[in-house]
Image (cartoon, rainbow, N blue to C red):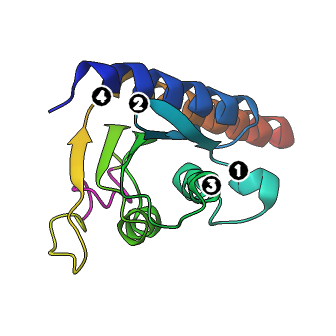
Amino acid sequence: MYIEKDLFFMKKALDEARKAYEQDEVPVGCIIVHGDKIIARGHNSVEQLKDSTAHAEMICISAAAEYLENWRLKDTILYCTLEPCLMCAGAIQLARIPRIVWGAPDLRLGAGGSWLNVFLEKHPFHQVECCSGVCYQESEQLMKNFFLEKRKAKDEGRNSRAT
């Protein structure tokens, strides 16, 4: 169940996702909040950094740890426009983030219940509270538009070579 401020912060994560979109990255955005303050922002930078681990959540977790000068992010909330993958879900667990909120499900790689659910498993240190579907339509539409444009460009490339 989401609370009103989740909408506000998810809109900020959507701003980050739009930055990724503009940079021709998969449009996923993330922020981390401590109290009511945004302490970290990130968006996918896999292509730009040539790094398969440069997901929005990973970038954001690193920035938050640097800001707090502590790898344990116990009193934070992570907002992401897409359900975390297995790598990011593991990082969320390891960083001790107690609550995450996401927009769209990731039916192929989602580790919050769409593909598998690592957050249901008993973790030795803590449990993660999950809230999904906040700003679902906006998050999903960004992803759909991005991949539609990619497919269209790919098809146009094929058609121009065939003539």
Frontmost of labels 3 and 4 is 3
Frontmost of labels 1 and 3 is 3
Cα separation, mark 4 vs mark 2, equals 11 Å
Q: Residues within 10 Å of mark 4 (few under 14, many from 20)?
A: many
To which residue does mark 3 refer?
59
Check whether the beta carbons of the residues at disc 3 and disc 4 lie within 8 A of each other: no
Check whether the beta carbons of the residues at disc 1 and disc 3 lie within 8 A of each other: yes
Identify the mark nearer the N-term, 1 or 4.
1
Residue 45's tag is: 1
Which residue is located at x 45 percent, y 39 percent?
Answer: 33
Bounds of the magenta segment: 107-116
- Residue 101 is covered by the magenta coloring: no
Give the quadrant of residue 154: top right
Check whether the beta carbons of the residues at disc 2 and disc 1 lie within 8 A of each other: no
To which residue does mark 4 refer?
134
Residue 140's tag is: 2
Give amino acid for label 3: Ile
Could you say which is closer to the camera, residue 100 or residue 46?
Answer: 100
Could you say which is closer to the camera, residue 1 or residue 77?
Answer: 77
> In what element is the residue under mark 1?
loop
Give amino acid for label 2: Glu
Which residue is located at x 25 percent, y 76 percent?
Answer: 125
Cα separation, mark 1 vs mark 4, equals 23 Å
Q: Is residue 135 visible?
A: no
Q: Is residue 124 visible?
A: yes
Q: Residues within 10 Å of mark 2 (few under 14, many from 20)?
A: some
